[in-house]
Each structure stands twice: as structure tokens, then as C-alpha cells.
Amino acid sequence: MSAQGWQSVVLAVVLAAAGLGAWALRLRAPLEVSAASLDAIPFELAGWRGHDIPLEDTVERMLRADHNVQRTYLDPAGGLVWLYVGYYGTERGGRSEHSPFVCYPAAGWDVVAGSERTVEVPGGGRVTEIRVVRSGEERLVHFWYRSHRAPHLVGEVEHEWDRFVGRIWHGRADGAFVRISAPLDGTSEDSVRARLFRFGSALDTELAEHWPKERPRARRLAGRSAGLAG
């Protein structure tokens, strides 16, 4: 068979597999999400002590997440970290509709030009790092995406692929946007980055333990019930 013939065969197989996958997904019952488990992430976390910061109603409506967690944490030395987790179930597409490059400017912060980079996390994983500034206040920010399959996802392609594989193999494509930040208030950037790494490592463990559950929603047997009623 010619090379062109083999390409046609491969393309046909891929299209058939995609069609079967889409058909299988349509047969699955819709998923019902229970994300309240995220609220059980400890307020005392590896020596850090935290408290909730309620989201404003307008911000919560804009984010359109299935569940939000926003807190501040303080370590014994007085080091501060802000935490935000926005969880999106499979039916919501598993991803945030907003990014820090939109949300920070909308809140009056400027993203420092040239500060965006991908950083390797000690112990495994990657995050996106940026610096933001507003009225002389500067923060170092780490953010990433997480799914039930992968603890650290960076970039659109990586995230989209994880969602595709999750839908096909596990029937779910839920995910969360995770952001942690700390003030650069005269402390060296390396020291603040190390603080974010320490907190992020402890957070990863708790997110894995308290990851939301998604279960098939019971289907109504309306047609059968109507038949029996007659």
C-alpha cells in the first residue's frame, strides 16, 4: 500500500475512534458534582494558619465556578500567602473562564512586563510565575491548573489534552484553577519564591485528599413511568 493509502487508513481509524468516543460520552449519565470537600482543606496547614476571605458577589458571579475557596495563610515567621482555588466540574468545562492576565488588570493591578515564566517546582511539577504591582505594592504570583488526574498543568495545550483524555478514559473532565501569591515587601524574590514553593507543596497534598467527587446523576425513566401509569 502506498504512503498516501496508509495515511487514509490512519485518518479513518482516528475518525472512527473519535466518533465512538463521542457516542460513548453521550450515553453516559450527566455528572453531579459535590465540591464542598474543598472547604475542608485545613486552616492549619504545615505550620501555616489561615482564615477565609469571602468573595464579593459580583466577583463570584464573574468567575462562575462550581466552588470557590479564598483564604490568607500566615507562617510562624509572619510570611503571608494568599490562596485562591476555583473548581469547575465536568459540565462547566473543567476550567476557569478568566485568567490572571485579565483578572489582575480588572482589579487595578499591572502585570509586570517580562515577568511571566514557567518555573519548575522542587519535588515535581511546574507553575506559571508572574509579578503584579498596584500603587507601589508588588506581589509574586504562582498559578496552575489541576485535574483529578494531574496535579500541575501549565498552558492551554497541556490542559486541553488532559481534559480530552479525562473525558474518554474516566468520563470526567473537572479541574481547578489554583493561585497563590505573596507580597514582595522588601524581602528578596528568591525568599518569597521559596515560601510559595513550601506552601504549594503542602497545598498539593491537601487538594489531592479533598478533591471533589463527581457521580452520575440518576436518569429519569419518564417514558417507562408514563407507560406503567397508563
Image (tube, rainbow, N blue to C red):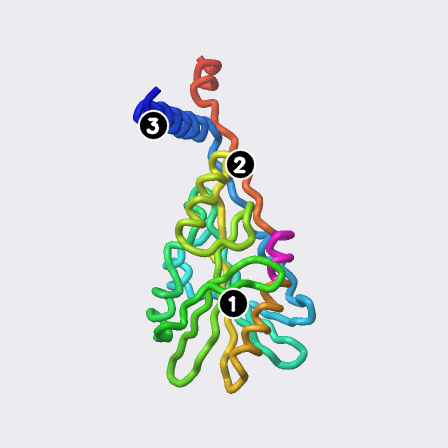
Quarter occupied by residue 10 = top left
Do the numbered discs 1 and 2 sit on residues whose CB atoms are within 8 Å? no
Q: Position of residue 13 (x, y in %)?
A: 39, 25
Residue 83 image point, x, y percent: 53, 67
* Residue type of the residue flagged with mark 1: Ile
Q: Is residue 149 above or below residue 117?
A: above
State the residue at coordinates (45%, 27%): 24
Identity, as a three-letter code, of the amino acid under mark 2: His
Q: Picture coordinates of residue 27 (x, y %)?
A: 45, 26
Point out the stretch of residues depicted in magenta. Answer: 203-210
Left or right, 46 with respect to 58, comes to right
Q: Circle 2 — which element? A: helix
Which residue in the structure is indicated by mark 2? 170
Is residue 92 covered in magenta? no
Residue behind mark 3: 7
Query: Main structural element of the magenta stretch: helix, strand or loop?
Result: helix
Query: From the viewer's perspective, is residue 196 above or below residue 150?
Result: below
Q: What is the distance, in whole Å, between disc 3 and disc 2 at their CAs?
A: 29 Å
| Residue at image mark 1 | 180
- Tell me what residue is drawn at x 42 percent, y 27 percent: 17
User: What separation in Å lies between label 3 and label 1 (alpha carbons)?
Assistant: 46 Å
